[in-house]
Amino acid sequence: MLVRVRLGAGLALPTGNSRVSVSLSENATVADLLDHLRAEYPALAPKINAALPLVSGRPVAVSHRLSEAQEVALLLPAAGGLA
């Protein structure tokens, strides 16, 4: 199945694109997707462990099963505040 991935700031640079499509086996999970991305883009591996996966705008666990043509957003947490 084909899954679309939207990479947030800080994650897109190693792939050269903010959006990639990934072919995964049926019944793949977010964890499978992350493993695939680590293997395909080794420079992404250190940051991907901190990425927050979202499906339909909602955070999901790595055990979440993906569906054909689903889009997964991977975002890095941001810190900030008033100084």
Image: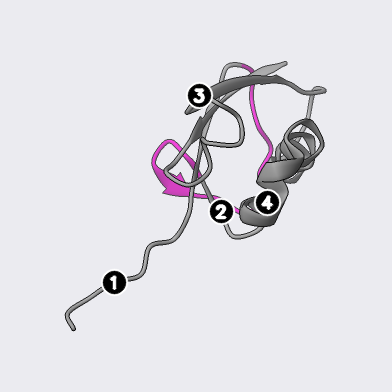
Question: First in sequence: mark 2 or mark 1?
Answer: 2
Residue at left offset 58%, top offset 22%: 20
Q: Which residues are magenta?
A: 54-68
Lateral position of residue 29 relative to residue 17, left or right: right
Per the image, the residue denoted by label 3 is: 19
Cα separation, mark 4 vs mark 3, equals: 19 Å
Per the image, the residue denoted by label 4 is: 62
Cα separation, mark 1 vs mark 4, equals: 26 Å
Looking at the image, the residue that sits furthest to the bottom is: 83
Lateral position of residue 57 relative to residue 11, left or right: left
Identified by mark 1, the residue type is Gly
- Please say if the residues under marks 4 and 3 sit with CB atoms less than 8 Å apart: no
Does the magenta segment cover residue 64? yes
**Secondary element type, mark 4:** loop
- Camera-nearest label, 1 or 4: 1
Question: First in sequence: mark 3 or mark 1?
Answer: 3
Up-down: is 81 above or below 18? Answer: below
Cα separation, mark 2 vs mark 1, equals: 17 Å
Quarter of the image where the N terminus is located? top right
- Please say if the residues under marks 3 and 1 sit with CB atoms less than 8 Å apart: no
- Please say if the residues under marks 1 and 4 sit with CB atoms less than 8 Å apart: no
- Camera-nearest label, 4 or 3: 3
Identified by mark 2, the residue type is Ala
Per the image, the residue denoted by label 2 is: 51
Question: First in sequence: mark 2 or mark 3?
Answer: 3
Q: Main secondary structure of the magenta part?
A: loop
Residue at left offset 77%, top offset 23%: 24
Per the image, the residue denoted by label 1 is: 80
